């Protein structure tokens, strides 16, 4: 858009804001994307539940390396008709590295002489030969899950703001078009022999559209208020504008990021590696499972053992089953690659299409601005009426709304693409928002 066009648009919109203020039937609160996103991170219930769940998961993971303590009490017991003394025990187990574990037991018994205790402890170790080790699961790490949650929250907030902005603009345009129809009807009533039936039908249709738009607008306002955990009935006036987003995105440069962030591809890759490892393990061990174990107790009594076991099952069938599992995993991995690649192409196509639509809407706006200037000169020369000039003004307004909405569509498409690549949207918001 040229500088001259931008100046004309700004001047036109300033006049438009003054002329359309009467259509604001409610006291709306201006809200920016950064403000809405900040409120969402602070108040959104689903986000709060997620953070709570992540905190509990971190605590559970920390407990894995801590002792597991259990208490057992037996206050009453009758053995062969005789009442036994109350007893109990306190046991603990501390997992160590490399398959080792430290176990201990403290026994308690209460009799006529008082409370007696006895303790027992031992250190055990088990090692599995030819083990495949820890294989990748394809699951997201805690940091990746939090990043995805934050990105989704940002996209939800922007989507709500954009849909509300577009609904408000559309309702404003419909209201002004309805006002023009009313003025046209009044002029027609003063013209002898003028057929007003078509205008009456248009007015009726305009009223129905306004009622429908008002209902949809109320639903969007309520949805945004609940998303931000604010009182029902809060009315917002979103101010959303993106900076220049006509950047070029190429599939080959984004492919690695997109695939690495895809849970479907990561799971398929993990399943493939697991199937390969299980087949290699079976071929290497010929079905035998060999393990060494040992332990030492508090009295320094120790033991060491080596065990070998094998399932009595035809090995050829076992190998064939594992080969089948590997073939299926390879097929699933190929399918996942195709589907994830398609999703990347779809995201890139959405951005490209939004860029094309924005360019077309800018050209249409410039065309309507030229028509608006011409109509003003025609009105001054007495060649057209004020109602005809108003028609051109509304067409210009519609073109400006269309350009603004296509810009918002492009902005959300770019952010969805970056989110799909696993990039933190919080870091790029200040760059793409005006």
Image (cartoon, grey):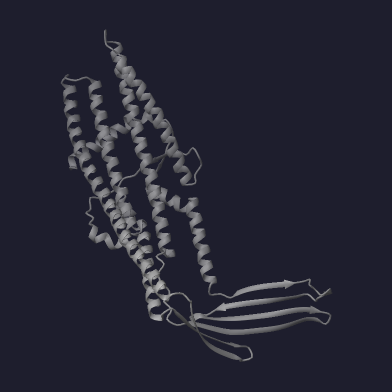
Observer-nearest of 393 and 301? 301
| Position of residue 227 measured from the top left corner of the image (x, y, whole percent) | 46, 46
Against 107, is 175 above or below?
Answer: above
In the image, residue 131 lies at what x, y percent? Answer: 43, 79
Q: Please give left or right for residue 118 compared with residue 44 in the image.
A: right
Residue at image coords 31%, 57%: 340
Name the quadrant containing residue 165.
top left
Residue lying at 29% horizontally and 10% vertically, measured from the top left:
190
Q: State whether residue 282 appears in this view.
A: yes
Camera-side residue: 149 or 374? 149
Q: Nearer the viewer, residue 383 or 314?
A: 314
**Image coordinates for residue 433, horizontal then vertical, percent:** 32, 50
Identify the residue shown where x is 33% and y is 56%. Answer: 420
Asked if 52 appears above or below 217 in the picture, the reply is below
Nearer to us in this view, 329 or 296: 329
* 54 lies left or right of 157: right
Q: Residue furthest top?
A: 192
**Residue 244 appearing in the image:** no
* Position of 345 relative to 260 (above/below): above
Residue 216 sits in which quadrant? Answer: top left
* Image x and y of residue 256, in percent: 28, 63
Left or right position of 4 against 345? left
Q: Please name the residue shown 24% across and 46% down the image.
A: 353
Q: Is residue 239 left or right of residue 358?
A: right
């Amino acid at each position: 858009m040229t500088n001259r066009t931008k100046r004309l648009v700004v001047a036109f919109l300033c006049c438009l804001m003054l002329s359309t203020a009467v259509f604001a039937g409610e006291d709306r609160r201006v809200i920016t994307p950064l403000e809405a996103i900040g409120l969402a991170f602070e108040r959104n219930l689903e986000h709060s539940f997620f953070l709570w769940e992540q905190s509990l998961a971190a605590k559970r993971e920390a407990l894995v390396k801590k002792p597991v303590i259990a208490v057992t009490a037996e206050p009453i017991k009758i053995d062969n008709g005789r009442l036994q003394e109350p007893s109990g025990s306190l046991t603990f187990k501390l997992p160590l590295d490399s398959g080792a574990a430290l176990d201990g037991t403290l026994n308690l018994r209460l009799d006529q002489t008082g409370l007696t205790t006895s303790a027992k402890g031992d250190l055990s170790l088990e090692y599995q030969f030819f083990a495949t080790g820890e294989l990748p699961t394809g699951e997201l790490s805690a940091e990746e899950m939090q990043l995805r949650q934050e990105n989704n929250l940002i996209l939800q907030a922007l989507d709500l703001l954009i849909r509300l902005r577009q609904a408000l603009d559309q309702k404003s345009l419909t209201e002004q078009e309805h006002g023009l129809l009313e003025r046209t009807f009044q002029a027609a009533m003063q013209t002898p022999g003028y057929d007003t039936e078509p205008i009456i039908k248009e007015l009726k249709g305009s009223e129905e559209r306004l009622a429908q738009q008002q209902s949809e607008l109320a639903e969007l306002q309520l949805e945004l208020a609940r998303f931000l955990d604010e009182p029902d009935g809060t009315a917002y006036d979103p101010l959303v504008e993106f900076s220049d987003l006509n950047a070029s995105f190429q599939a080959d440069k984004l492919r690695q990021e997109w695939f690495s962030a895809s849970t479907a591809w990561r799971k398929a890759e993990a399943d493939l590696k697991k199937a390969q490892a299980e087949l290699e393990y079976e071929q290497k061990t010929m079905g035998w499972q060999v393990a060494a174990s040992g332990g030492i107790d508090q009295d320094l009594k120790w033991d060491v053992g080596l065990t070998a076991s094998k399932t009595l099952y035809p090995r050829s069938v076992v190998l064939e089953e594992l080969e089948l599992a590997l073939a299926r995993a390879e097929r699933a991995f190929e399918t996942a690659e195709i589907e994830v690649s398609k999703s990347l192409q779809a995201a890139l196509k959405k951005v490209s299409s939004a860029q094309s639509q924005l360019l077309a809407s800018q050209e249409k706006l410039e065309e309507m601005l030229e028509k608006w200037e011409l109509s003003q000169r025609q009105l001054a020369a007495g060649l057209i009426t004020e109602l005809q000039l108003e028609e051109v003004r509304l067409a210009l307004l519609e073109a400006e709304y269309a350009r603004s909405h296509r810009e918002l569509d492009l902005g959300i498409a770019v952010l969805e693409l970056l989110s799909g690549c696993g990039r933190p949207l919080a870091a790029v918001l200040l760059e793409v928002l005006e």
